[in-house]
Every structure is written in structure tokens, then in C-alpha cells.
Image (cartoon, rainbow, N blue to C red):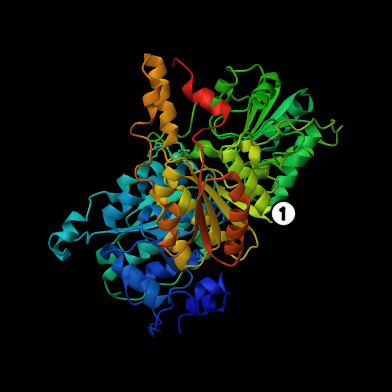
Amino acid sequence: MSDPKRQRAAALPCPDAELGGIDRPLPAGVNAPAFGSDVVADALRATDIPYIALNPGASYRGFHDSLVNYLGNERPQMLLCLHEESAVAIAHGYAKVTGKAMAAAVHSNVGLMHATMAIFNAWCDRMPMVVLGATGPVDAVKRRPWIDWIHTARDQGALVRGYTKWDDQPASPAAAREAVLRAAWIANTAPRGPTYVNLDAGMQEARLEEPVAPIETQRYMPPISGAAPAERVALAADLLRNARKPVILAGRVSRDVEAWKMRITLAERLGARVVTDLKVSAAFPTDHPLHAGAPAVIAPAREMLDALRNADVLLSLDWLDVAGTLQHAGGVPDARIVQISVDHRLHNGWSMDYQGLPPVDVFIDCEPDVAVPPLLEALGPGRAQPPQAAQFSFAPAGDKLTVDHLADNLRRAVGDRPCALAHVSLSWNGASWPFRHPLDYLGSDGGGGVGGGPGIAVGAALALKGSGRLPVAVCGDGDFLMGVTALWTAAHYRLPLLIVVANNRSFFNDELHQERVARMRNRPIENRWIGQRISGPDIDLSAMARAQGVVGFGPVKDIKDLARTFDEAIAAAEAGNPVVVDVWVEPGYTAAMTAQMTRKGD
Ligand SMILES: Cc1ncc(C[n+]2csc(CCOP(=O)(O)OP(=O)(O)O)c2C)c(N)n1
Ligand SMILES: [Mg+2]
């Protein structure tokens, strides 16, 4: 170990000793960078990214060798994945917990094509990650016949340019080092998102003719956090101080506990109603007396819409879709609107995930976490208004097993344990599970790309391993089946995790769409299930888990078996295993969502 950078890294504690003990290479006796890809590996280690989820391929065999035989498969450690979509989804789930990028590596154009939906999900969810890919050799005379030609594209980054913050195809080891540092820096800077670096196979595999001059890598990734402009904060404070019925729309915020408490202080100082959304992570305690209605994905609760209609000032803390929410509430209100967000810096012409353009009276161009403390200060001490009563209750009804019964029994089985709900099914009822901590709920897949659930859950489990917080994910059966091979990675790396499948044996969401079309056209709604139901044969989901080394329970078909099964499943997860419970639920969504999706007319 003569290289000073490697010695420094060796002195750092391993991110997780147990995980670090898996997949240990024989010592290769390599202690100085000798190839282009060794320089890339050094750069990746300099970013402090602890893991790289990957599916292998010859296009980055040089880089792969550097990770194993030059870095010794630590900092970053490889996580082998069975599909590129899971590799990226795992990085996505990791970022949801930590707020930080991990890396994913995907092979040439084909691996990147597999990865695209998961990258899009992370982009829409504003989650950072560094995706490394490869192509070439760009120098055609170095290409092997056939395979190197089909796996070389003129502009591979074009596949993902519409939903990544930045991409590059560096032509030399020094340029690749710069690209990796820039990719990590840009991904981790708000508004966060995926970046992509495409490593030419020829550049990776070429022997270094001379050492690449060392640089102080941290100086190339300076932390950025823009402050809130004081005069804008003063304007917002004036509006809010005089508001009679302010509403806070608590949207994309961090997992920081102090920032969470500050939002509560702000709401209580203003006596503001607060609304939250299941599309993003927990932003405010949903059972706080000021919280209005249960959070939802598609159909906002009536209490939430009432609060918005009655409001005189709306304060958006980077709310995901201000314009769409106003549309739900009946159009543009008279209320004054304060927007705190940096999201506009990311918007581009390819993807419309920026949503409609909302009217805004005071725009504060910084992250909500940064703006709330000066806003509180500008408001000054004031009369705390009496809290209002909590607005929603929950009790599962009927004797047929529904997702509400699933949620009720699961929550009771979890009890007082700290838990992170890493994913929920489309059928989830936001009233069934209160959130009281920023890690209690990690939001949705972001881009509506079904199949992200299992990988995101595994990534969250990776980040939470050893934290004492139990990762729990509820996936639809369609979502589970599309992403099921992410589970093998959880088994191999022994990541404790509980996935419960709300198995309605259907791509049920689309049954409701077909029902709506049938209503609009006066055709039989009874046929809505055709081309949607996943039965005949029924799929044994817990066997799919067991086949990958995951503990599997079920199918559970009776309400009375739920409590015992969940107790056993949690015990297995707490013993260090990934666990899947298959629960057969009646097809159905919340009443509000069903009404919204099946209403007649456009
Ligand atoms: C990649 C992808 N394919 C198809 C869809 C369309 N789609 C939206 S929801 C859904 C059904 C998902 O089924 P499941 O996870 O079982 O949830 P359920 O609606 O049955 O509760 C489908 C197919 C999509 N959003 N993404
Ligand atoms: Mg389903």
C-alpha cells in the first residue's frame, strides 16, 4: 500500500463490517494505478460512495477489474444485481434514506436500456445517484468483431439525457476522474438527480503511459447550499403573519429530524393546516392536529381540498405539483401563494415531470430546509393558535381480507419498533398508517414506473442495515413480479427487510381504467378484468422469494392468519433475513381513488 490515497481510505471504518465480509477477493498485490480504469476507481473512492450496484458486462471489464483487484472490492463495495433495473432501483432506495448518491454500473447500450425506467423513476423522485456505463472501444480499429460493434453507440448518453442532470463520455483517464467527481457533485447538489458517465472501453483498458498527477479531490466537489434571499423571506413572513387561514403544503423535504421539528414549529406558530402527499417521503406528522386529511397519491382527501379552498395564504415547501393540486381544489384560488423550491433549475424540454406552471406571489429560490429557519425568525414570536382536531380515522371494514386489514395487522405487528415504510401499493390507504418521523415513510417510485418497488425496498434496507429501524415495503403483485429478482441481492448481502405483497392477482389499476372507458362508451364494465388478471395459474409469490434465498410466507388468505404471520415474518427479519409475505387481498382501492378513476366522462 504505497499509494497515500489508499492508505488513508484503509484507515476509515468500513461502512458495515458484516457487509464488508461478503465477496472478499484474494489480495491482488496491486498498489499503484496502472490502467485508465484504476484512475476511475480511485476517483469513485474519492467521492465516498460506499456501494456500487451492478450487473456485469465486457464493456466495463477493465473498470470491474479495478474495483476488485485494485480497490479490493471495498469503498465502494460491489452489490451484484440480477437486472440493471434493480441495480438502479437499489441506488434509488439508498438515496431515499441517506439523501446521498450511491453508484450503479450498467453494461454498454443494452444494460443502459434495461436501466432506463429506474433512472427515470429516480429522476422524477429527485434522488441522486451516479450511473457508470461503458461503450466502445470508441477507436474502431480496437473493436472485436461483431459484439464490440453492436454494443457501441455514437451517443449512448442520449438514451438517458432527458432524465439525468448531466452526462459525459470522457476520453482520457484524467478526464474520467474529473467526470466522476463532477457526476457525484452534480448528483448530490439540489435539485438532486441521477448523472451518467460513459467510460470508453479503450480508455479503461489502456495502460497508463505516465502517472496521472494527484489532485485534492474534495476541492472539486464543494458543498453548495444557497441561502434564502432576506427580502423574499420578509415578504413571505408578512403574508403569513397576516394570514387568517394559512395552509402549508409540505412536499419534497429532507430526512433531517431538526428540519422536521422546525416545520412543526412553523405550523404551530402560524396555526396553519398542513397537507402532505404519499408521492413523496414523510414531511410532517400525519396525526398532528394541524394535519388536514389522510395523505394520498391520486385523489386528495376532502379535508385537504377544504383546507385549500378556505386558505388565504398557501406556503409550498417544494410541493410536487402545485398547479395540479389547485386544479383538484377547483382552480386558481384568491389565496396568495408562496413557493420555496429549487426544482425549476432542473426542468428541461424532454420530460413534463415539472407539472403545470403554478401562479406564485413570492418565490423563494432555495431548499425548504434552508428557508424555514429564517422564515421563523422573520415571523418573530406570535400567538400560537389553538390546534385543530385530527381529521381522519381508520378502521378496516368487512370480513373479506382487504389491503386495510393487511395494513392494520401489519402496523399492530410492527408495534412501537422504529420502522421505515419504504414503498406502498397503489391500493394503500393513507389513513392506515400514521407517520411521525422523517424516516417513517420514504415516498413512491417517483416516475410511476411499475416494478421499482422491490429494488427501492432493497436499497432502503441497505441504507438502514444496522440502524435499528426495520424496513417494511408493501408492493402490489404486479410491481413485485416485475422487480422480484432484486430480492436475490438482499439475500446475498443479508439485508434485513420485510416485503408484504398486497396480492390482488391483477394489474388492478388498469381494471379501473377499462371500467372507466366502458362507462364512457356504454359498454359492459364486467369485461374490465380481461387482459388484467394474473390468475390461471396463480403465481406462488412466496416460492419466488424462497427460490432466491429469501424467507417466504403465504399466501395468507384469511384475516385471522395475518397477525401471527406478520409476527413470525418480523421475527425472521429481525434475525437478519429478507422476508416476503404474500397476502391475497380483495381487489379494490380507497373509495376516493375509485371514484376519481371511474367517474364518467373525461
Ligand atoms: C412499467 C409500467 N408498466 C405499466 C404501467 C401501467 N400500470 C400502472 S399501475 C399498473 C398495475 C400495477 O399492478 P399492481 O402492482 O399489482 O397494483 P394494483 O393496481 O393491482 O394494486 C400498471 C400495469 C406502469 N405504470 N409502468
Ligand atoms: Mg395487483
Residue 24 falls in which quadrant of the image?
bottom left
Give whichever of 401, 21 is nearer the camera.
401
| Image quarter of the C terminus | top left
Q: How many labels does the image show?
A: 1
Please tell me whether mark 1 sits on a helix, a strand or a loop. loop
Q: Does 599 sit left or right of 339 as displayed? A: left
Q: How far across and down, in percent of the image, does residue 556 sit?
A: 52, 49
Above or below, comparing residue 578 to residue 327 in the picture: below
Above or below, comparing residue 168 to residue 228 in the picture: below
Give whichever of 353, 213 is nearer the camera.
353
Q: Does 438 sit left or right of 82 as displayed? A: right
Give whichever of 519, 262 is nearer the camera.
519
Q: Does 208 sit left or right of 259 as displayed? A: left
Q: How far across and down, in percent of the image, does residue 130 sit?
A: 44, 56
Q: How far across and down, in percent of the image, does residue 5 sit?
A: 49, 76
Above or below, comparing residue 49 to residue 20 in the picture: above
Residue 14 falls in which quadrant of the image?
bottom right
Q: Which amino acid does label 1 sit on?
A: Asp
Report the residue at 32% width, 55% height from top.
169
Report the residue at 85% width, 33% height from top.
384
Provide the residue designation for mark 1. Answer: 416
Q: In which quarter of the image is ligand 2?
A: top left
Residue 212 visible from this viewpoint: no
Above or below, comparing residue 304 to residue 64 in the picture: above
- Mark 1 CB near ligand 1 (8 Å cut): no
Q: Using a 10 Å C-alpha cutoff, classify the residue at mark 1 as few (fewer than 14 neighbours), some (14 to 19) or many (20 or more).
A: few
Q: How far across and down, in percent of the image, does residue 335 sit?
A: 67, 20
Report the residue at 66% width, 44% height from top.
369
Report the residue at 55% width, 59% height from top.
497
Give whichever of 50, 454 is nearer the camera.
454
Residue 571 visible from this viewpoint: yes
